[in-house]
Image: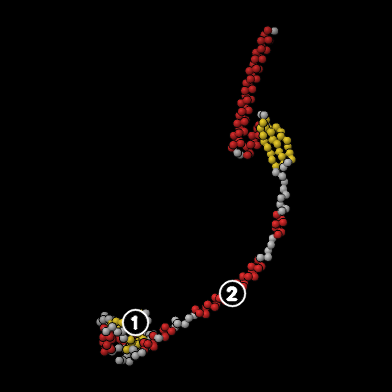
Amino acid sequence: MGAAGQGLSTDEVQSIREALAAGRKPKVVFTASAGQVAGQVGQVVELTDPAVSDEFVVVRFGRDELPFSPADVAVAPRGAGRKAAEPQPETPEPEPVAPAEPEFVLDRVPQQRREEPKVETAEPKPAPARKAVKAVKPKGPAGLTVTLAYADGEWTVAAQQGSKSLAKPYVVKPAEALRMVALVDVPGVQEAVEQIMAAERAEAEQQAEKLRAELAEIEARLAELREAH
């Protein structure tokens, strides 16, 4: 075996090759020429072709498998790998979770105590005064009703406020009644008024024709009387 600073000799490389063929993974120590990993222990997992690259010694170090030259590694002394491997599982063993449990419990207790006085201060807020104010609202003027009516060929308008009669039914012209109905803007009401107006117009025209016929007869008779005179 060579020293840790000299690297692997030709015989040591051959013995490692035979160990790999037998299924073993020889341990090696990184020399100073390996850089930052000097002094660390690794396992040889493969020997590639030295004719292709000088770094033909593939060493597993932690989770990585990296190629090195024979000068970068030396045969590890017995027990070197065990000492380096034992402290690794010791670091994750401490349980920092245990002290965290009482901390969460202590945080919850003051939160409940702080919320209790907030609820107590919010509860004593009765509002009886607002209910008393609502009782004053039923004070307002009585309802006003304006009625437009048609009966016996006449349009009348009446006004009443509550139980008091402000204006007794008085006659209005058909044109005024039609204007009032137009303000309502209800098609059914307007059609009913228009029908009434049309019926009145037809009756008025018939009466006018009768009067014209009667007037024509009277004028003819008067003309005859004048000729006889």
Asked if residue 86 can be seen in this view, the reply is: yes
Asked if residue 176 can be seen in this view, the reply is: no
Q: Residue at x 70, y 44 (%)?
A: 143
On the image, the x and y values in percent for residue 222 come to: 68, 12
- The kind of residue tagged 1 is Arg
- The kind of residue tagged 2 is Val
Q: Relative to the observer, which residue lies in front, 157 or 97?
A: 97
| Residue where numbered disc 1 is placed | 60
Q: Residue at x 65, y 37 (%)?
A: 180
The relative height of residue 213 versus residue 191 in the rendered view (above or below) is above
Asked whether, in this view, residue 59 is left or right of residue 104, the answer is left
Counting other residues with Cα less than 10 Å from the Cα at mark 2, is it few (<14), some (14-19), or many (20 or more)?
Answer: few
The relative height of residue 113 versus residue 195 in the rendered view (above or below) is below
On the image, the x and y values in percent for residue 108 come to: 57, 73
Dot 2 and dot 1 residues touching (CB under 8 Å): no
Quadrant in the picture for residue 90: bottom left
Disc number placed over residue 150 in the picture, else none: none
| Residue where numbered disc 2 is placed | 109
* Label 2: element kind: helix
Real-space Cα separation, disc 2 to disc 1, in angstroms = 52 Å
On the image, the x and y values in percent for residue 46 come to: 29, 81
Q: Relative to the observer, which residue lies in front, 201 or 85?
A: 85
Quarter of the image for the N terminus: give it.
bottom left
Q: Residue at x 64, y 16 (%)?
A: 216
Earlier residue among tags 2 and 1: 1
Counting other residues with Cα less than 10 Å from the Cα at mark 1, is it few (<14), some (14-19), or many (20 or more)?
Answer: some
Quadrant in the picture for residue 66: bottom left
Q: Residue at x 66, y 17 (%)?
A: 215
Label count reads 2
